[in-house]
Image (tube, helix red, strand yellow):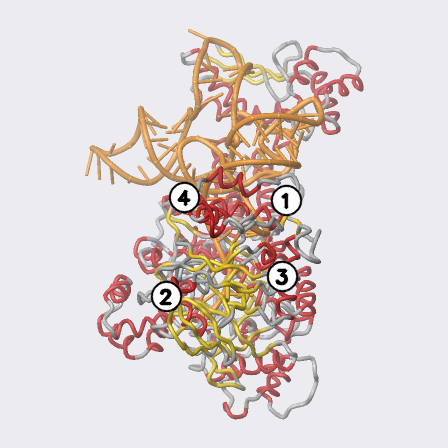
Amino acid sequence: MVKFNLKEIDKKWQEHWEKEHAFRPTVDTKRKKCFITVPIPYPSGSMHLGHLFTWARADIYARFMRMLDYNVLFPQGFHFTGGPIVGMSEKIRQNDPATIEAFRKQGVAEADLKVFGEDPKKLAEYFSLSFIEDFKNTGMSIDWSRTFITSSLNPYFSKFVEWQFNKLRSKGLIYEGRHPVVWCPNENTPLGDHDRAVGEGESPIKFSVIKFRSEKFFFPVATLRPETIFGVTNLWVNKNVTYCIAEVNGNEKWVVSEEAISKLENQLNKVRILDKISGERLIGLSAENPLTNENVLVISADFVDKAIGTGVVMSVPMHAPFDYFYLNKIKSENPAMYSSIKPKKIIIVPGQENLLEMAIKEFGTSDSGLKAATKKVYKIEFNLGIMSDKTSGLEGIPVKGAEKTVTDLLDKHKTHESLYELTGRVVCRCGTEGTVKILDKQWFIRYSDKEWKTKTMKLIENLKTYPQEIKLQLLNTLEWLDDKAAARTSGLGTPLPWDKKWIIEPLSDSTIYMAYYTIADNIEKMNIEDINDATFDYIFSETEKDTENELVKEMKDEFNYWYPLDMRVSAKELLQNHFIFFLMNHAAIFDEKNWPRSIGINGWLTVNGEKLSKSKGATLTIKKGLEDYGADELRMIAAAGNGMDDVEWDPDTINTFEPRFEFVAELMELKKTFESGPNSFDAYLNSRLIYLTEQTKREMENFRYGAAMSHSFFELYNEIKAYMELGGNDEKTVRQAVMAFIKLNHPFFPHITSEIYSRLNTDGSRIQPSWEDYPSGIRNEVLENEVAILRNTIDDIKNVLRLIKRAPKKITLEIAGEKKFELYNKVVAEARRTKNTNEIRKTLRTSDKLLDKLLKNVNRLPEKELNGNLELKVLEEGKNYLEKAFGCKVEVSRNTENERAVPGKPAINII
RNA sequence: GCAGAGGUAGCGAAGCGGUCAAACGCGUAAGGCUAAGGACCUUAUGGCUUAGGCCUUCGUGGGUUCGAAUCCCACCCUCUGCACCA
């Protein structure tokens, strides 16, 4: 019995690799190279099974490429840039129970916790080291001599990022501008999705503010549909709301709700409150529509919300259900005063003339009903509506285009501003209501740049993507990609070189660092003061200026050898943010020959139906996993899926790992019992080996490890077992099959395969398996068919025995005569061409019972012709197995007469 | 809302025009092996069937084809991303 001590084997080989520097490649221009990366993790917690899924895939790729004799570089750094690490440290210092509990759960000692609270850097370092340990313990073939951290904590890396940003700026791809963000007024910081207690996904939306002039001041109304200004019949205020009269930007007096004041201020307006006035007192005033110059009345309505917009609303009854309903209401309440107000229809939807009335009928006049009606009316009018003849000059143009025309017109009259509102309620984790703030003098990367996008499109077209579909998604993302704020005022990171109060934010400083790996070890040997933009220009560009500095020369050589990046592996959530920036920045900064070659994207891992997010993952850490399982066993996780779908990983699968390897290893120890004397089953197994090797390789190359492993691990194992069972007993064949098993599975399970390989490969010619001598050649498909027939026959016998419910005394198998095989093979040949039975009948021009039978199930015919003599031989050789399995005498013969004997289906007689 | 991916047996997951009642794995059941449990081995696992057969299935409803899990159309449902956030 072979028994493996997996823990010992893991340790043995990990130490071996470490000692040999097995994964620390050097520049060797004679060899083909392969450069692989996975996005740098943010070390704010422990590595969990979700991480392992992605990294195992990268490592399998790395090991596979090494077996194909590539010089493989697979380095790994850590991302310190950003806010959360600092935030966590802060929370620990404040004794936040939830945060502290989360760290304790991951096994962090109290003394360490204390240190985390004092210094965020220590926290990040702690988890970086923890990651490295987990990577090593799971057998990741990472070159640790090139690891680095980001942010100003690593001045060398900061120099590199400064070079990148200076470069982008010099190409005109960075500019200073303003930008609305969701803002926490308490913490004075932008509120990202992760910082919110309520309102994930909500964002600022731009309202038009149109100013209606009245005698003493302006009524600024906020609207999402400025084109409806032609249909305004009145303005709405709320009599129960307190309004402010305020001087805005020095020269105009506006009437707005009290709540609107801080919004205006946050959005870069200078506001001075002059007076406060009850909504009641605004009723009855009139104001001038800036486009139509009509005077409209100010009326009170309860639905006007002081917190939305300016607290002043324009009423467009024919296109807004709220306005329609409330106007009718006050008209009926006070006809004398308001009956003269006549709604105007300014948008026509062909075929839906009574759209608004129908919508109100459909949803009712409750608040929620009117809301639903509004949604419907807006949507239909926006998409299908056409401006009517009551819209001086805009008649006939679609609503879709009218908005811009109207705002342009209003701008010309200087009666239009804008105001951002949130698409929904946002509450900060600190409990404060979020709001919109416009950040001034913010730095942007011009990702909207047409020329840049075109260049990137070219890059993406030449990029190999696994799976294929993600290329389309990248191109689509490129289309809507807009400018991105590149810096913030808090968190770790590298300051902008020309404006040091800004810190470059994490998604922007992590776009080209893969190039940094090629120099990461050497650059730290330099004096930091000697490094400047010229150094990097020299290293990373084509220019062949000479330099005295040998070290810099070496870095240039390293870069030239290793770049471009051959493969980048990640989970799908990074595709439309990190990956697109990564590609765009490469297009901008590097020469075309250094653009990335391929990317591999995987889905999310679920375990027992649960997604492994950061919080859930805390309970499924690698450290916990390694307590129960060997490294290779955990690595079976890579088989969990092939494409971008979320994949469920079933830990029970692990149970099948050890017995299979034990069985395979045992085969070699038992070799003395093998008699030599190859038979059909040897040729059969060889043929299957060739097939499964081809399949495995193909799936490996396509980055489909689930499929690859199912061939290399499960199917191959089954084939070897079937071979033994049917009576194969040739030592050479078994050895070859075992070797194939070891080799094909080496990328997945490097420890145990190395162990078995080293035991088998006693001449010591090779330390690590290679694909150089994997089984190859031409398959014997006819033989494969015939063995399949033997197996089907076995099934059929069992089937029959079950039916007759008694033990057989004797079984005879009669194989069809040669004539039948001739006809059969003719049909098979025809069926390859067409499966149309009438056509086959026509070409063969024979009528025969057998032909009828075959044509009845055309689609069950094999691809290849059968051979009667071979069928006889295979069944003869399977006789031993049959006799043993069924416990009776078995006879195999050829019988031309037996009606039931059909090629591929011998007649079975049970006595 | 926009963009992309997907819905297959008890579960996970292959298959992407014809050897498809559907690979492979897990689970479950029976038998073997065990002092026993685990592991392991054998068999079964859509339904019916006393001779290898038949019938019904691949989100729902249509369509194309000699033939559809696979192609087309519509609908329902799920997942991912949508930016200052790693």
The CA span between labels 4 and 1 is 25 Å
Q: Which mark is residue A366?
A: 4
Give the distance between the C-alpha atoms of the residues marked 3 and 4, in whole angstroms: 32 Å
Which label's residue is closer to the chain start, 4 or 1?
A: 1
Considering only order in the chain, which callout, 3 or 1, is on the residue closer to the N terminus? Answer: 3
Callout 1 touching callout 3 (CB < 8 Å): no
The residue to which callout 2 is attached is A278
Q: Label 1, on which residue?
A: A349
In the image, A420 versus A509, the foreground residue is A420
Q: Residue at 63% across / 13% down in the picture?
A: A895
Q: Residues within 10 Å of mark 2 (few under 14, many from 20)?
A: some
Callout 4: SS: loop
Q: On the same chain: label 3 and label 4?
A: yes
At label 1, counting other C-alpha atoms closer than 10 Å, the crowd grade (few under 14, some 14-19, many 20 or more) is: some
Where on the picture, by quarter, is residue A690?
Answer: top right
Between the residue at mark 1 and the residue at mark 3, the CA separation in whole angstroms equals 22 Å
Circle nearer the N terminus (2, 4): 2
Residue A306 lies left or right of residue A113; in this view the side is right
Mark positioned earlier in the residue sequence (3 or 4): 3
Q: Is residue A253 above or below residue A846?
A: below
Disc 1 residue type? Val
User: What is the crowding at mark 3: few (fewer than 14 residues within 10 Å), some, or many (at least 20)?
Assistant: few
Q: Amino acid at mark 3?
A: Thr
| Residue nearest the viewer, comparing A549 with A630 | A549
Residue A568, percent across and down? Answer: 55, 63
Which corner quadrant of the image does residue A311 belong to?
bottom left
- Looking at the rendered structure, whether the residues under marks 4 and 1 are on a common chain is answered as yes
Task: Tell me: residue A463, above or below residue A528.
Answer: above
Q: Position of residue A546 (x, y in %)?
A: 68, 90
Q: Residues within 10 Å of mark 4 (few under 14, many from 20)?
A: few
User: Rounded to the nearest whole Å, what is the CA distance between mark 2 and mark 1?
Assistant: 40 Å
